[in-house]
């Protein structure tokens, strides 16, 4: 799904707000599963559900901004490494969740594997070089930022913001599942996402962008491809929420590191077969680094199941 989202953002839509709108507006169709365990929340529960859904929509905007700015194999592991860290801190503070020693070790290995897969260079920099790189990207305390590194800073900001918001959403929805039935809480939270997409239309600039893009759509193939992607994404999202409802938030998010292995293999295949559509940097050193990162992810997963 990440590769497909990257393709749509790069080649078809070119706007994180528009793409988040199209993704969010389909959330209303989650109501088809409500009859399987029909439940109506009270006013307080409904307000919490709607807020969780709205928070998820805001998260998507930052996430799609980051994904649009860089390669899928860089952005996904960066965000994926930060989400478990933020989830661990937030779930410990607000939910009182903790991990066993082996779970915590696997948690760290999964995160480290994701970081290795997200960094392009295999070279370990000296401290002075790291400091200079940091200054180039973020600027001195009172100085400006070199124009060359402004996109990098925006990427770091959007990736970090989306990771923090994802973690906040997961912890919030976990707390909701602890007191509300899973299907009911999930469906009503999707209503919050849908209402958030309608709120986007109240902003004139965004409304014009959405209507202009819709007017320019001539090929039904784009819509069928988008709907197929969203169907698989919806199924994956439901299963992720179900897993969160049953286990520790941080651990579930760290287990998602398995997706990096599949992402790496898919992108490797597509970038070689269709370089004009999807181009990723896969030099020898980068390849070795990503293989090591994938191996660590597999090791962490093995530790969790043994």
Image (cartoon, rainbow, N blue to C red):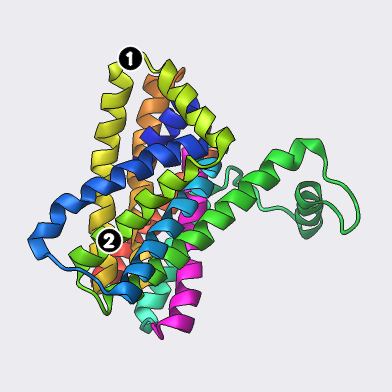
Position of 78 with respect to 274 (left or right) is right
Closer to us: 111 or 43: 43
Whether 67 is drawn above or below 212: the answer is below
Q: Which residues are magenta?
A: 71-98
Residue 226 rendering spot, x and y as whole percentages: 31, 30
Q: Which mark is residue 257?
A: none
In the structure shown, which secondary structural element does the residue marked by tag 2 occupy? helix
**N-terminal of the two: label 1 or label 2?**
2
Residue 241 rendering spot, x and y as whole percentages: 28, 62
Work out how far the residue at label 1 is from the one at label 2, CA to CA, in angstroms: 33 Å
Residue where numbered disc 2 is placed: 188
Q: Residues within 10 Å of mark 2 (few under 14, many from 20)?
A: many
Closer to us: 217 or 106: 217
The rendered magenta stretch, by its main secondary structure, is classed as helix
* Labelled pair 1, 2 in contact (Cβ < 8 Å): no
Displayed quadrant of residue 47: bottom left
Give the residue drawn at x 75%, y 55%: 130
Whether 85 is drawn above or below 163: the answer is below
Image quarter (top left, top right, bottom left or bottom right) of the N terminus: top left
Residue where numbered disc 1 is placed: 219
Displayed quadrant of residue 91: bottom left
Residue 225 rendering spot, x and y as whole percentages: 29, 27
In this rendering, does residue 228 appear at all? Answer: yes
Q: Which residue is situated farthest in the right direction here?
A: 142
Residue 214 rendering spot, x and y as whole percentages: 41, 23
Image quarter (top left, top right, bottom left or bottom right) of the C terminus: bottom left
Whether 224 is drawn above or below 285: the answer is above
């Amino acid at each position: 799904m990440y590769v497909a989202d990257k393709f749509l953002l790069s080649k078809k839509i070119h706007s994180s707000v528009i793409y988040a709108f199209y993704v969010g507006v389909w959330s209303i169709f989650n109501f088809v599963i409500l009859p399987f365990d029909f439940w109506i929340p009270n006013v307080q529960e409904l307000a919490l559900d709607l807020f969780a859904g709205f928070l998820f929509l805001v998260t998507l905007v930052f996430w799609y901004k980051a994904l649009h700015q860089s390669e899928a194999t860089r952005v996904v592991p960066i965000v994926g490494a930060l989400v478990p860290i933020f989830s661990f801190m937030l779930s410990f503070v607000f939910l009182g969740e903790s991990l066993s020693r082996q779970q915590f070790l696997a948690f760290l290995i999964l995160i480290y594997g994701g970081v290795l897969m997200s960094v392009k260079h295999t070279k370990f920099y000296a401290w002075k070089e790291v400091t200079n790189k940091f200054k180039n990207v973020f600027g001195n305390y009172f100085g400006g930022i070199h124009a060359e590194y402004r996109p990098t800073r925006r990427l770091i900001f959007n990736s970090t913001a989306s990771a923090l918001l994802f973690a906040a959403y997961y912890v919030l929805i976990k707390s909701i599942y602890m007191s509300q039935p899973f299907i009911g809480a999930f469906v009503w939270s999707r209503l919050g996402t849908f209402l958030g997409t309608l709120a986007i239309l109240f902003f004139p600039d965004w409304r014009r962008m959405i209507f202009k893009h819709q007017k320019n759509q001539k090929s039904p193939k784009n819509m069928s491809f988008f709907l197929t992607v969203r169907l698989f994404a919806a199924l994956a999202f439901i299963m992720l929420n179900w897993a969160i409802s049953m286990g520790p938030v941080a651990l579930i998010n760290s287990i998602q590191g398995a997706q990096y292995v599949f992402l790496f293999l898919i992108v490797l295949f597509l970038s070689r077969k269709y370089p004009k559509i999807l181009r990723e940097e896969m030099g020898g050193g980068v390849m070795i680094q990503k293989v090591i990162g994938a191996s660590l992810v597999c090791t962490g997963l093995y530790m969790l199941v043994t």
